[in-house]
């Protein structure tokens, strides 16, 4: 008997949460039919899903609080209902962006009986909306770094008692190694930065570090940098318009050949503030790049060892970052040693193991 699930995705730009979901979907049994309702058709191209557009007025997309936030989600609810009238009933509905972003799903659950599986991959607000979603979800899978915010939201409404091991299950992100292109040999060191332009990703720190390295004549012609970025529709983001003229930096807006750009690089640099996980870091480790990360007590800082399978620098400190990058340029053997060990460390992040509980939950 065929089963049907619905993926709800109201975020209008690419992101790691969608990549995680696509990896999971690729491993589902063939008899499960997958529908996606989203206002971002580009992210779901070349996926074996039935795509349905989510009506999303541009004037409301950026609204995250207040009356306009609720109006936005009422419109999303209407779009959900209209789309669901066109197709047969779903067995499960999966929200991939957190209870506040996926709020319309929980409004839908007030109208019809649905089982909601919620993935939480970033901190959630301590709000009544978040608590409403956490209480109504059938199953919640969360990254360990988000547990504190979940507890805070539940404590706000005195519903900590609803936390059970069977409903709230931690998971870590995994990767299908076969989808990642391995690093190629390059005479020059290639620095690689890839993320959205949201301000908490701190691209300006990497740009400042590259400008500083450009002023160091001893490293002339030893390196280049590739910046692959997504310009988000919502949220405040870093304006790159005045930075395109910096030497040795190649800018790529949402490139289709990201795999090739990464494989042509040597070092991945993370400048994000308290990254909940950092899928790009794991992808770069699998590709054979050395990874440079802030010592910020976030996930990878706690799971990688400085000078062994990564190189760490003082968070938001440009001079510390420059010191780490120039060390790798000055010592090619050390760079190779770090990158080789990073590939070994990445082996424990098999997507089949990391997503096993989610894969069991969806069909059952």
Image: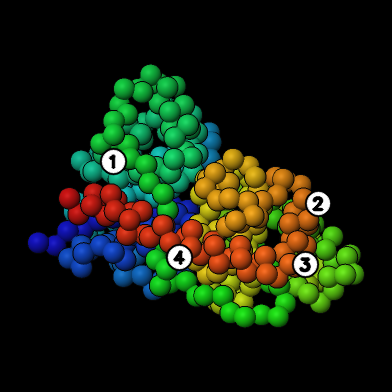
**Is 179 in front, or is 77?**
179
Q: Describe the colour scheme in one phrase.
A: rainbow
Q: CA distance from mark 1 to mark 3?
A: 50 Å
Q: Quadrant of residue 44?
A: bottom left
Q: How far apart are labels 3 and 2 at the CA level?
A: 16 Å
Does residue 153 appear to the left or right of 315 in the view shown?
left
**Label ID, residue 43:** 4
- Spot occupied by residue 261 in the image (x, y as percentages of width and height): 60, 75
The residue lying at 63 percent from left, 51 percent from top is: 306
Q: Where does the image place residue 324, in percent across and percent down from the top left? A: 73, 57
Q: Earlier in the sequence, mark 3 or mark 2?
A: 2
Secondary structure of the residue carrying numbered label 1: strand
Element on which disc 4 rests: helix
First along the sequence among labels 1 and 3: 1
User: What is the distance, in whole Å, between disc 2 and disc 1 at their CAs?
Assistant: 45 Å
Which residue does the numbered mark 1 point to in the structure image? 139
**Residue placed under numbered mark 2 in the picture:** 319
Q: CA distance from mark 3 to mark 4?
A: 39 Å
Question: Which of the labelled discs sits on residue 330, or is there none?
Answer: 3
Instruction: Judge by depth and name the residue closer to the eye, 48 or 166.
Output: 166
Quarter of the picture containing the N terminus is bottom left
In terms of image quadrants, where is residue 308?
A: bottom right
Q: Nearer the viewer, mark 3 or mark 4?
A: 3
Q: Are marks 4 and 1 in contact (CB under 8 Å)?
A: no
Please tell me which of labels 2 and 1 falls first in the chain.
Answer: 1
Q: With 255 as the anchor, is 238 left or right in this view?
A: right
Closer to the chain start, of discs 3 and 4, is: 4
Work out which residue is located at the far left of the displayed protein and give it. 1
């Amino acid at each position: 008997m065929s089963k049907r699930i619905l993926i709800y995705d109201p975020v209008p730009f690419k992101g790691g949460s969608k990549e995680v979901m696509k990896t999971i979907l690729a491993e589902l049994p063939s008899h499960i039919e997958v529908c996606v309702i989203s206002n971002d058709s580009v992210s779901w191209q070349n996926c074996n899903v039935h795509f349905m557009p989510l009506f999303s007025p541009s004037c409301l997309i950026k609204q995250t609080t207040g009356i306009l936030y609720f109006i936005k989600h009422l419109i999303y609810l209407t779009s959900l209902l209209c789309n669901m009238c066109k197709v047969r009933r779903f067995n499960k509905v999966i929200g991939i962006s957190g209870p506040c972003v996926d709020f319309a799903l929980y409004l839908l659950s007030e109208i019809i009986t649905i089982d909601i599986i919620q993935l939480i991959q970033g901190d959630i607000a301590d709000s009544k909306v978040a608590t409403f979603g956490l209480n109504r979800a059938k199953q919640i899978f969360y990254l360990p770094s988000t547990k504190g915010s979940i507890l805070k939201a539940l404590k706000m409404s005195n519903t900590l008692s609803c936390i059970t091991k069977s409903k709230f299950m931690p998971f870590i992100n995994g990767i299908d190694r076969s989808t990642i292109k391995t690093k190629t040999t390059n005479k020059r060191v290639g620095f690689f930065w890839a993320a959205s332009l949201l301000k908490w990703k701190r691209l300006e720190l990497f740009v400042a570090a590259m400008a500083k390295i450009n002023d160091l004549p001893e490293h002339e012609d030893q390196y280049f940098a590739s910046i692959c970025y997504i310009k988000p529709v919502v949220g405040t983001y870093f304006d790159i318009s005045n930075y395109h003229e910096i030497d040795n930096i190649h800018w790529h807006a949402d490139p289709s050949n990201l795999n090739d750009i990464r494989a042509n690089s040597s070092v991945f640099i993370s400048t994000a503030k308290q990254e909940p996980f950092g899928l790009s870091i794991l992808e770069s480790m699998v590709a054979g790049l050395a990874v440079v990360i802030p010592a910020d007590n976030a996930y990878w800082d706690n799971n990688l060892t400085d000078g062994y399978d990564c190189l760490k620098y003082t968070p938001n400190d440009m001079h510390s970052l420059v010191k780490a990058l120039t060390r790798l340029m000055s010592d090619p053997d050390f760079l190779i040693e770090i990158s080789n060990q990073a590939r070994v460390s990445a082996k424990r992040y098999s997507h089949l193991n990391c997503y096993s509980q989610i894969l069991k939950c969806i069909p059952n």
